[in-house]
Amino acid sequence: MSVINRARSLGKHRGKTPAQLRDALTAAEGREIGLTAVLDQLAATNTDLERQLDEAGIDLSGALDDLRAAKQTIRHLDAIVLLRDREIDRLNDRGRVGYLAETAATKTQPIPLYRAPFAATDPAHIPAITT
């Protein structure tokens, strides 16, 4: 290997020059400043998301309370409807029994005919109304 090739080889494998190191340091500092700004934005976003999560938790808690109250109201109304249906059935049975008893009574008893004392066709025979 010649001296010139050896010098070229050493020059190629040698580290960066001080100017290159300064440029690399300046670029790294610029990236660090940019990353710091990104980190600040991410921290602000994280804080906002945590606030939204807390609000959503409060809203969910209120919605669950409303749901429990609505379910309780539905159970109460279902019980009222059940009682109403039982009462309707009881009254229907009672009415059916009464109707059957009345029908049986009318079939076995003669129907009395009522004749008014003024049933004549002559209006002169209608008694006067006095108060």
Image: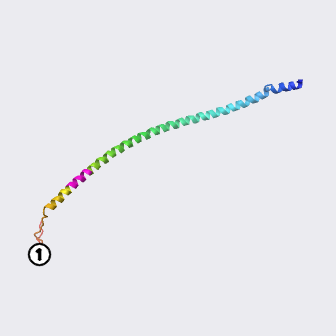
- Residue 100 is situated, as x and y percent measured from the top left of the image, at 20, 57
Residue 25 lies in what quarter of the image? top right
Display coloring: rainbow
Identify the main secondary structure in magenta. helix
> Which residue: 67% across, 33% down?
34
The answer to whether residue 92 is left or right of residue 48 is left
In the rendered structure, which segment of residues is drawn in magenta?
89-97
- Residue 71 is situated, as x and y percent measured from the top left of the image, at 38, 42
Kindly identify which residue carries mark 1: 124
> Which residue: 76% across, 28% down?
22
- Residue 73 is situated, as x and y percent measured from the top left of the image, at 36, 44
Nearest to the observer: residue 26 or residue 5: 5
Amino acid type, mark 1: Ala
Quarter in which the N terminus is drawn: top right
> Which residue: 22% across, 55% down?
96
> Residue 94 in magenta?
yes
> Residue 101 in magenta?
no
- Residue 128 is situated, as x and y percent measured from the top left of the image, at 11, 70
